[in-house]
Image (cartoon, rainbow, N blue to C red):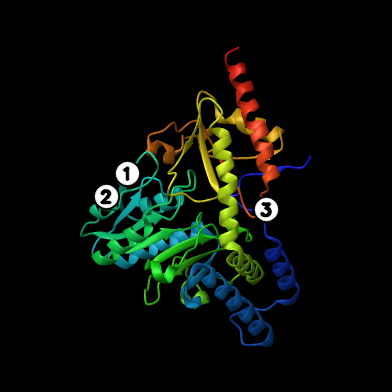
Amino acid sequence: MTRSYLDHASTSPLRPEARDAMVAALDSVQGDPGRIHEEGMAARVALETAREQVAALLGARGREVVFTSGATEAIAAAVWGAAQRGRASGNHHVVTAVEHSAVRFAAERAGDVTVVPVDRNGRVAVEDVLGAIGPQTTSVHVQWGNHEVGTIQPVAEVVAGCRERGVLVHVDAAQAAGRVPIAFDRLGADLLSISGHKLGGPTGTGALLVRRGLRIPPLLVGGDQERARRAGLEPVAALVGLGAACRAVASTLIEESAAAARLTDRIRAGAALIPGVESYGDRDHRLPHLVCLGIDGIEPQGVLLGLDRAGIAAHSGSACSSESLEPSPVLEAMGVDAHRSLRLSVGWNTTHDDIDRLLASLGPTITRLRELATG
């Protein structure tokens, strides 16, 4: 049975351009990019080409791109580096209540944390973020777009306020990169983290953008790779794949974003016809590829399993469907039902046929589960 993959917010299938580039690199690139022999220099050229491709997608300079093993490492490096850089004046971090757990846990481990609340749509107020900054604040962390409900935060305004106050600001763009235009040079943020596999690159790749002129201590030490900003031999073939994915996205970003919005608009419209189902997140400020639905009275396990049997892969931020045994902290922060949610996310290979299958299956699945629940 042909399946419909609607979990791109978790991980997006590898783009053909990335796969082809990786296969070619595995056959041709053999050396350590830190060596001066012919094989090493060939690897260096491949690595720096990938770096420029990533930078081009994100509106950055190549020298600002530090390759990592993914967004989790990039976030940890940003938080730890900011904490170490500012520890002479204090070790206080400001995060929003809907940040990814990678940001929240890293900040809690690094020092004292102030959590800034959000509204029912999952959006933070700029004045609340800036009001949480104190004399000992070393960094502010704000996501570009939320990973569960898709709400876009007022990133530019937060960054501008932090720069005025002389406080480092890190933007988690793992969910936004490849979905909406990002111009790191114009944004003015100090640090920005992305994930490779969420935009159709290979797993195990990511990047931390570090503003030109900013120096933070590296998280990983032991070698001078990445201009002494991240130790460890770079996985050149994988990063070549990341670069190729970014190049592919850059050439079609506007079209892909518009197509994703049309698909998710169909999902919202169809879900609105089902009793007891509501869409979460901000309708005016949202990522184009993601929909989060609250389903009254039905545990998400049954919905996910019912959709899976119908050939549809989806996800829930609630406890039962993940490794965690806790309700969704994002939905809790928004003040909505944190136990019963369904997240549907589209990507580069999603078609209208996939949405047709979803809309034909979602209502009957929910109805059947409610009938079972009432005996």
Check the image and report above or below for 70 versus 146.
below
Say which residue appears at 63% left-offset and 58% top-offset. Answer: 200
Which of disc 3 and disc 2 is earlier in sequence? 2
Residue under label 1: 117
Residue 273 location, x and y as percent? Answer: 56, 29
Occupied quadrant, residue 307:
top right
Q: Amino acid at mark 2?
A: Asp
Residue under label 2: 128
Q: CA distance from mark 1 to mark 2?
A: 8 Å
Find numbered disc 3 in the image and state the secondary structure of the residue it sits on: loop
Query: Quick check: can you spot residue 95?
Result: yes
Q: Which mark is residue 349?
A: 3
Occupied quadrant, residue 70:
bottom right
> Pointers 1 and 2 in contact (CB under 8 A)?
yes
Which of disc 1 and disc 3 is earlier in sequence? 1
> Pointers 3 and 1 in contact (CB under 8 A)?
no
